[in-house]
Image (cartoon, rainbow, N blue to C red):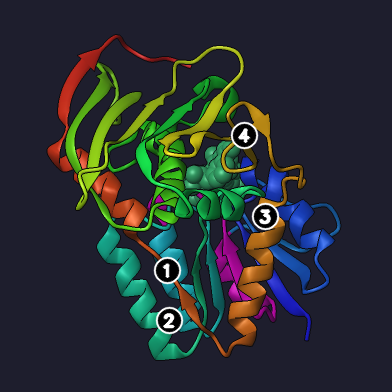
Amino acid sequence: MTIRLGLVGVGKIAHDQHIPAIKASPDYELVCTASRQGSVEGIPAYTSIEAMLDGEQVDAVALCQPPHVRYDAAKLAIEAGKHVFLEKPPGTTQAEVVALADLARERGVTLFASWHSRYGAAMDAARDWLAATTVHGIQAVWKEDVRVWHPGQEWLWEQGALGVFDPGINALSVLTALLPRPFFLRDAVLEYPANRHAPIAADLTYTDATGLPIGATFDFRQPGPHNWDVHAQTEAGTMLLAKGGNELWIDGELKTTEPEAEYRGLYARFAGLIRDGGAVDADTVPLAHVADAFMKGRRVTVEDFHY
Ligand code: NAP
């Protein structure tokens, strides 16, 4: 069965990743879009999800708008009996995502909270390698130029938005998938531009029940090439999981060569959940870590940020 899909919020990530992945998949037919301005050539375009659900027969929707408008759109789609793919972060609060997951179970439709970095080409190899040794410490470093990766995206800085945690939550999705035990925050420093409601940088110190040192550093002010890396010091040597989960290096030697295919993996998973009769996959742990950092973090004011 081909899944008739409606794409909602046709912006940067929809064009960069969703549309190519959907077109490459035998599981889907992209039948329409809902976006105030964006559209896909040759596909019926609606300006709201309400109009799209009224006007088209779709089985599923992929929600690619910023997170603060996602709950309302997801609820509407679930209540209309549609399967729902949520871009990351799945919402602006953990509780709203849990409520959506309950609603999806009640209605027998799939809710998939996607975490694209968990579908990095080297993730399984890195998890297996770490599981086979003793880990002494692990740190995620996610640094990028916000002007390159989020050009002009004012929504990123509004109250309730995640600021640097918007990419940083990818690092947390990777750490939570790599490590065998839950970890928790000990200390956090969040840097807020004086003219913004969301942090531009964060330094986070975690540990787990064994006392493992775990760190994460996020920064939006990195000019030039970005870093989306996890470094681990272990009994068996040093590990670098680079390119957001896509390359595994052990003691400086590249160990994986599979091509990056995160969004193809996400769409294959979504199709599998739908075929499983409307299964729900909505892990909110990375979002809980963001909430903890906002709750416990020391707030430092830094210079204004302008695009
Ligand atoms: P974006 O281009 O700013 O937003 C996507 C689209 O959503 C916009 O083009 C806009 O389309 C619609 N939109 C924007 N503000 C809206 C609002 N207030 N109400 C309703 N619709 C709105 O952002 P993006 O970079 O694609 O990011 C969207 C999501 O994908 C975020 O959660 C982000 O974390 C995630 N993501 C982004 C990246 C990346 O590299 N940028 C990578 C992976 C995941 P219309 O104006 O046509 O309605």
- Residue 104's tag is 2
Q: Of discs 4 and 1, which sits in the foreground?
A: 4
Residue type marked 3: Tyr
Residue 19 placement (x, y as % from top left): 74, 54
Image quadrant where one finds the N terminus: bottom right
Are circles 2 and 1 on residues that touch, CB within 8 Å? yes
Q: Nearer the viewer, residue 68 or 110?
A: 110
Where does the magenta region start and end?
48-69
| Residue at 57% over, 39% down | 244
Are circles 4 and 3 on residues that touch, CB within 8 Å? no
Q: Of discs 2 and 1, which sits in the foreground?
A: 1
Residue 99 placement (x, y as % from top left): 30, 73
Q: CA distance from mark 3 to mark 2?
A: 22 Å
- Residue 263's tag is 3
Q: Regarding mark 1 in the picture, which secondary structure is present there?
A: loop
Q: Of discs 4 and 3, which sits in the foreground?
A: 4
Residue 213 placement (x, y as % from top left): 27, 36
- Residue 282's tag is 1
Q: Regarding mark 3 in the picture, which secondary structure is present there?
A: helix
Are circles 4 and 1 on residues that touch, CB within 8 Å? no
